Amino acid sequence: MDVANRIGAARIILVDDDEAFLAMVSALLTDEGYVVEAVADIRTALDSAAKAAPDLILLDLQMPHGDAEDFMAAYQAFPKPHAAVIVISGATDARARATAMGARSFVPKSFDITELLALVSLHT
């Protein structure tokens, strides 16, 4: 059965402008049974969240057409409930920025797969 058709599968929006990273993390999460929409910019992520409420958003800090703070400001204006947002970034100030913008958690770009999967499971 196709993962996208699994009843009850958590829907995750993965936002990053690095195509290789999108492919790797998307495949990892899909193999774990999640429905993943991988997008490369903030506008597309907001459009996706508006069309179908996600269960979780994995968000890079630096993106085309805005940054994570722009995304969070626009997303917070959406009707509630809001999905948890986890920032995944290699920026040196990423943890502080993630906390300041209200993200639930932060994962450095050089992450441990087991830790990422545990965080995703916790927030979906």
Image: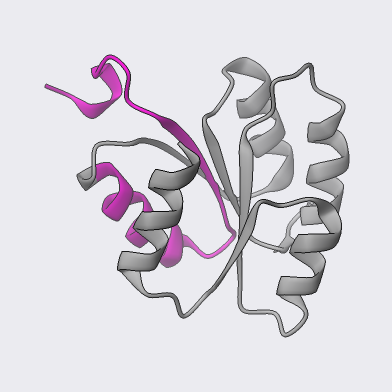
Segment colored magenta: 1-30
- Which image quadrant: the N terminus? top left
Kindly identify the residue that appears in the image at 52 percent across and 30 percent down.
55
Q: Is residue 101 left or right of residue 85?
A: right
Q: Position of residue 35 (x, y in %)?
A: 35, 32
Q: Quadrant of residue 4?
A: top left
Q: Is residue 112 left or right of residue 55?
A: left
* Front one among 16 and 109: 109
Which quarter of the rendered picture does the C terminus lie within? Answer: top left
- Residue 52 shown left or right of residue 112 in the figure: right
Q: Up-down: is 1 above or below 20? A: above
Q: Is residue 74 magenta?
A: no
Q: At 64% from the left edge and 60% from the top edge, which residue is drawn?
A: 60
Where is residue 106? Give x, y as percent.
62, 65
Give the residue at x 52% y 75%: 109
Front residue of 57 and 21: 57
Q: Position of residue 91 (x, y in %)?
A: 70, 79
Where is residue 105 shown, x and y percent of the image?
Answer: 62, 58
User: In front here: 115 or 43?
Assistant: 115
Name the residue furthest front.
Answer: 122
Viewer can see residue 71: yes
Q: Residue at x 64, y 46 (%)?
A: 85
Q: Indicate whether 105 appears above or below 110.
A: above
